[in-house]
């Protein structure tokens, strides 16, 4: 068993890096970027080492560290990770260097400080890692709220049109959710035996009514963060206004805190309430799958479109979580990971297109494949991953979610499966309107459009494409890490997979 | 008189040994080649097409080697090879597993054999296209996906290849992506296929939910444990998938639009491979279909209806590739009819599939050769008298044409006519309906194919101004034509005798119907009548080439209004729905929650400004949102 304090190092290191970067002189942007990039790569290396040291068959929570913080309340800096958090930590550590690389010139456009931009990304990384690594409910809450700050400034200071509006909206929504959670956290401490330790609280029992209220407090915060219908409207604004790199982190990682929170806190701590409210959670998720996909089809702005597709994808994750079967839940966790890769890639590529064209409006494109064929190819690949084509990793997760859900709830699974048709609709139509067809004459005037894929951009997209393909064919390494954690979570809820029905008659599945 | 099927013993596949243990190479070789072609970029422009052709050629040779290996084995049920675990979660065990049995062996030879010829032809056809390397990349990808489709040993692998084929066909159809029509056609094909795929996927879920496995052998050995309702549901869901991929009613509309791709694409997608995937799916799942008479009845009805739709529309089209496309729709209808009849007709349908692979590929490549010589003209009314200028194309197309309409002793006669006989053997009045539909179909087929042949190669010239000297195509294009024509002539007789025996390990021993000279004679008579009528109408000249348009012809020209129907019922309401939702989401739900947020957050002026004046939208959105959630709750509780 490794004794290296992986989790605290991973949490603290990016913050230190952020401080260093922020203190670097403003007139040396090249140096700032290099330091930030190298720092984030080093963090990634630590994350890889942690993945290697993690024992898939070992105890559920590993690398546990605990330091005193506020003894009177029993608040401690406790970190620990299971397989679910591990894959998310790896995803963060992977995406941040790529986002830094992709955002190389993003901050120069605004009049704000370049070092601050990269410092904010590193601060964001630190808080995001903290939120996934925390094993103390209070600590989790603190990271959950602090995480908003760097993102608020990234959107509000470096974003596109309507950035102020989007940033305030993002902040208020999350804050409102956070307040409900704070109430629930305090309540949990009161009735849960005056401790914030996740391991201890897991064995606490509550009165039925209390448990339901506590569940709702957490769930509301997570549903806003995820976001589920009808709390989703902040995301398209934030995703549309944020710089592409920040949007990739926002949608690719930060939103997963919502679904992760449900898995880590709602299900194990409040198993009975989880079962009680599961139909509601599933219904909201199901509405999201169809509703957001339809909205995505109707969007006129590329970044808003991708944001809406993500809401539809979060719907799939939500369905997978509340189905309470191993396939669906493992699929949901894998979905969180794969969605980070696929939508991260999609956002970054859209960012490259937008940077060339100087506009995110779909109507400003048209026939762009003529000018940027390679970028168009990468864009197409990201689109295919987004619609979960077999051969790309999202297929595996989507299939698992659907097949696992089908074994317990056929109607929901069938309706959600129709969502894959809508997914093909929004992806292909987006591609057709931007890349294919008669070239938009205006593109001829835009010099940037003819810029070929630079080496920097190639380095950004290549690891993501490779990972999406490899895990599309061989997802087992990730599944092996996820499966035990999911099994433990489901046994906390007291659910097991149904046996094959073999002779059941299923009329509603006939059509 | 329902032919009885008996699987003598349980389905079990051996482990591969010797050369057969490497049959995964069949998929890997074209896949690697595709990856090289697509990743190498411009550097590979010079030699890319050669690699593309070579990889499929090697796959064909390997296919032959494996074929003889399997041929020499005592137990020919097939060999199964699990490469690695794909999705192991809980009870679900999906392996990346392959199966090589007589059925897949046959498809491998068809895909790689005909595919190789089409690749060869495309070297010449795409010579002047700057995207030729990309084209061969997609082409190889298509072959690899198609081979995975037929070589998988479980339904998830089949689905994997299935969607991969859909991707490749999308890329090929919209190959000239700057043409709006090509982009639209590609999207249409992908979307309609996805509708079918969704049905297929649900079928797989249902199999797993009821049997706990998606593995062919385990599924087939446990079909008898399923309730009648479940079996029928699974079969119908698989059929939905098959209809999407094979262009069968009601998902046929994408197939003729797929003509927007380059001609070798049409040939590959239509004739040889992709559209036969649906037939493969049903033939592969025959234990499931055999267990449900209801599902089989649906299959035969879909087949009979589609074959008539294809014929009727084929008669009215003037675009040579579209006539052939609708002809394909119709011929696959015959195959669906065959597999739906089951029993001895399984093999008949597959024989027709093989023979069709030859003559339809030949016909498509022939039409490409004509277009090549006529400045890419596709309107048959602008052809005429080409026999003198393109003798090889004339001869090969002629043989394909005679084979298709079923003139003895060419292949179509041996393969299509027995399906008609089998249809008449179906019990009850349905047999008469099916048989008669198939019979009328062969008359119509003779009519539209004669029309195509006569308008193109005979009669007076009706060329456009810009065509001065039509020419025969280069050797690299004509050689595949000749090979395919020889196949069209010979294949039927050879296949009819040998394939039934070859497929016995898959479908079991079947009771033969015996001959029915009455039906055979009548079929030939109807066919000749169709030929004669078309010849009389179109051999004379210009005036009749421009048909008068009565209501029937107009309807047929408009694809029997199926496109209009799709647009009116799905597309337009969908557009309005998305627009309405976008409005509602921006004004209503967003505004409402903004209002709340403003109140909670202490009244941010910025936010308050956006929310004034939309009270009605709030009310609307509360109502709409509540309805949505209630509906979803209902769905959830339905279970």
Image (tube, coloured by chain):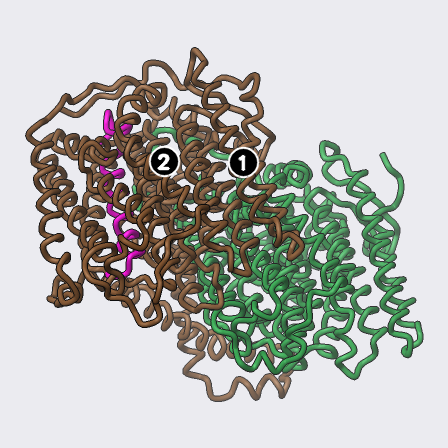
Chain colours: A green, B brown
For image coordinates 54% across by 21% down, the residue present is B20
Mark 2, other Cα within 10 Å: few <14 / some 14–19 / many ≥20: many
The x, y position of residue B228, in whole percent, is: 27, 31
For image coordinates 67% across by 81% down, the residue present is A164
Q: Chain of mark 2?
A: B
Any part of residue A194 in sight: no
The residue segment tinted magenta is: B318-347
Q: Indicate which disc residue B73 carries.
A: none
Q: Quadrant of the N terminus of chain B?
A: top left
Q: Is residue A28 left or right of residue B63?
A: right
Q: Which residue is mark 1?
A: B27
Q: Indicate which disc residue B280 carries.
A: 2
Which quadrant of the view contains residue B438? top left
Mark 1, other Cα within 10 Å: few <14 / some 14–19 / many ≥20: many
Contact (CB < 8 A) between labels 2 and 1?
no
For image coordinates 26% across by 61% down, the residue present is B383
Label 1: state its secondary structure.
Answer: helix
Label 2: state its secondary structure.
Answer: helix
Answer whether residue A177 is magenta in the image. Answer: no
The x, y position of residue A85, in whole percent, is: 71, 48
Q: Main secondary structure of the magenta part?
A: helix
């Amino acid at each position: 068993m490794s004794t290296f304090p992986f989790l605290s190092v991973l949490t603290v290191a990016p913050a230190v890096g952020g401080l260093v970067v922020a203190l670097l002189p403003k007139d040396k942007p090249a140096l700032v970027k290099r330091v930030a990039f190298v720092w984030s790569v080093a963090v990634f290396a630590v994350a890889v080492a942690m993945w290697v040291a993690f024992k898939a068959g070992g105890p559920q929570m590993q690398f546990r560290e605990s330091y005193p913080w506020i003894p009177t309340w029993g608040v401690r800096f406790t970190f620990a990770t299971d397989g679910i958090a591990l894959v998310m930590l790896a995803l963060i550590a992977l995406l941040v260097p790529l986002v830094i690389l992709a955002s190389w010139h993003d901050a120069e456009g605004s009049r704000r400080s370049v070092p601050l931009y990269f410092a904010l990304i590193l601060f964001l990384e630190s808080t995001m890692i903290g939120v996934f690594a925390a094993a103390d409910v209070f600590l989790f809450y603190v990271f959950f709220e602090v995480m908003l700050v760097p993102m608020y400034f990234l959107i509000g200071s470096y974003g596109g049109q309507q950035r102020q509006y989007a940033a305030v909206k993002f902040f208020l929504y999350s804050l409102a959710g956070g307040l409900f959670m704070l109430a629930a956290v305090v309540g949990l401490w009161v009735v849960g035996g005056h401790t914030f330790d996740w391991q201890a609280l897991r064995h606490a029992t509550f009165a039925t009514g209390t448990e339901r209220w506590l569940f709702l407090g957490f769930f509301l915060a997570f549903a806003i963060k995820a976001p589920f219908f009808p709390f989703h409207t902040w995301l398209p604004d934030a995703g549309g206004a944020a710089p592409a790199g920040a949007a990739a982190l926002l949608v690719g990682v930060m939103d997963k805190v919502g679904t992760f929170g449900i898995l880590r806190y709602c299900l194990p701590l409040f198993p009975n309430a989880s079962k009680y409210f599961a139909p509601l959670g599933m219904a909201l998720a199901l509405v999201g799958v169809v509703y957001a996909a339809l909205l995505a089809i109707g969007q006129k702005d590329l970044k808003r479109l991708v944001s809406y597709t993500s809401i539809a994808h979060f719907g799939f994750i939500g369905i997978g979580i509340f189905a309470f079967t191993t396939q669906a839940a493992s699929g949901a966790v894998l979905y969180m990971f794969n969605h980070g890769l696929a939508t991260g890639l999609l956002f970054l590529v859209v960012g490259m297109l937008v940077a060339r064209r100087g506009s995110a409006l779909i109507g400003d494109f048209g026939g762009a494949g003529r000018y940027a064929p390679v970028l168009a190819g990468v864009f197409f690949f990201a689109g295919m991953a987004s619609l979960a084509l077999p051969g790309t990793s999202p297929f595996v997760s989507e299939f698992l979610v659907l097949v696992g859900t089908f074994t317990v709830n056929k109607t929901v699974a069938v309706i959600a499966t129709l969502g894959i048709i809508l997914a093909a609709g929004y992806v292909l139509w987006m591609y057709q309107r931007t890349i294919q067809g008669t070239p938009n004459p205006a593109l001829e005037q835009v010099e940037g459009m003819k810029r070929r894929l630079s080496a920097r951009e190639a380095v950004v997209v290549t690891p993501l494409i490779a990972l999406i393909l490899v895990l599309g064919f061989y997802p087992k390494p990730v599944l092996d890490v996820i499966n035990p954690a999911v099994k433990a979570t489901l046994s906390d809820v007291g659910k097991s997979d149904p046996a094959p029905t073999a002779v059941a008659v299923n009329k509603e599945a006939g059509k | 008189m329902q032919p009885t099927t008996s699987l003598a013993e349980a389905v079990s596949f051996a482990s591969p040994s010797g050369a057969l243990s490497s049959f995964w190479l069949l998929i890997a070789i074209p896949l690697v080649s595709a990856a090289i072609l697509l990743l190498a970029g411009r550097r590979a422009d010079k030699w890319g097409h050669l690699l593309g052709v070579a990889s499929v050629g090697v796959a064909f040779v390997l296919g032959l080697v494996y074929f003889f290996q399997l041929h020499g084995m005592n137990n020919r049920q097939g060999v199964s090879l699990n490469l690695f675990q794909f999705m192991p979660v809980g009870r679900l065990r999906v392996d990346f597993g392959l199966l090589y049995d007589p059925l897949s062996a046959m498809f491998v030879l068809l895909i790689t054999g005909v595919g190789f010829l089409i690749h060869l032809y495309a070297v010449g056809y795409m010579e002047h296209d700057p995207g030729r390397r990309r084209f061969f990349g997609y082409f190889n990808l298509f072959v690899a996906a198609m081979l995975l489709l037929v070589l998988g040993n479980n339904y998830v692998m089949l689905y994997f290849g299935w969607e991969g084929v859909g991707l490749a066909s999308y890329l090929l159809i919209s190959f000239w992506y700057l043409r709006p029509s090509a982009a639209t056609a590609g999207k249409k094909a992908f979307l309609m296929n996805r509708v079918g795929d969704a049905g297929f996927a649900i079928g797989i879920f249902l199999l797993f939910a009821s049997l706990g496995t998606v593995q062919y052998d385990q599924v087939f050995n446990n079909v008898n444990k399923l309730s009648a309702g479940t079996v029928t549901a699974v079969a119908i869901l698989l059929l939905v998938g098959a209809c999407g991929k094979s262009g069968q009613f009601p998902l046929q509309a994408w197939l003729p639009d797929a003509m927007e791709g380059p001609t070798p694409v049409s040939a590959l997608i239509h004739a040889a491979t992709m559209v036969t995937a649906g037939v493969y799916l049903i033939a592969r799942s025959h234990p499931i279909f055999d267990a449900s008479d209801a599902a089989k009845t649906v299959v035969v009805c879909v087949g009979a209806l589609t074959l008539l739709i294809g014929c009727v529309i084929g008669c009215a089209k003037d675009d040579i590739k579209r006539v052939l496309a609708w002809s394909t729709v119709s011929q696959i209808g015959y195959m669906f009819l065959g597999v739906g009849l089951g029993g001895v007709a399984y093999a008949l349908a597959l024989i027709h599939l093989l023979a069709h692979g030859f003559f339809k590929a030949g016909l498509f490549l022939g039409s490409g050769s004509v277009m090549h010589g006529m400045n890419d003209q596709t309107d048959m009314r602008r052809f005429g008298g080409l026999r003198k200028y393109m003798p090889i194309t004339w001869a090969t197309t002629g043989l394909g044409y005679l084979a298709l309409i079923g003139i003895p002793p060419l292949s179509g006669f041996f393969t299509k006519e027995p399906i008609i006989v089998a249809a008449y053997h179906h019990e009850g009045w349905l047999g008469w309906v099916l048989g008669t539909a198939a019979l009328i179909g062969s008359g119509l087929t003779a009519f539209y194919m004669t029309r195509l042949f006569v308008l193109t190669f005979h009669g007076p010239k009706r060329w456009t101004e810009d065509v001065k000297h039509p020419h025969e195509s280069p050797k690299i294009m004509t050689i595949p034509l000749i090979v395919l024509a020889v196949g069209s002539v010979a294949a039927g007789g050879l296949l009819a005798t040998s394939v039934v025996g070859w497929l016995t390990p898959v479908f079991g021993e079947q009771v033969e119907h015996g001959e029915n000279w009455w039906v055979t004679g009548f079929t030939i008579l109807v066919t000749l009548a169709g030929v004669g009528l078309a010849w009389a109408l179109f051999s004379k000249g210009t005036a009749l080439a421009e048909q008068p348009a009565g209501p029937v012809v107009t309807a047929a020209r408009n694809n029997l209004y199926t496109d209009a129907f799709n647009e009116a019922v799905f597309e337009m309401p969908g557009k309005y729905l998305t627009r309405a939702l976008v409005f509602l989401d921006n004004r209503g739900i967003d505004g409402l929650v903004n209002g709340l947020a403003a109140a909670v957050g202490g009244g941010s002026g910025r936010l308050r400004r956006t929310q004034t004046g939309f009270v009605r939208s709030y009310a609307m959105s509360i109502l709409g949102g509540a309805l949505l959630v209630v509906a979803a709750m209902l769905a959830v509780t339905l279970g």
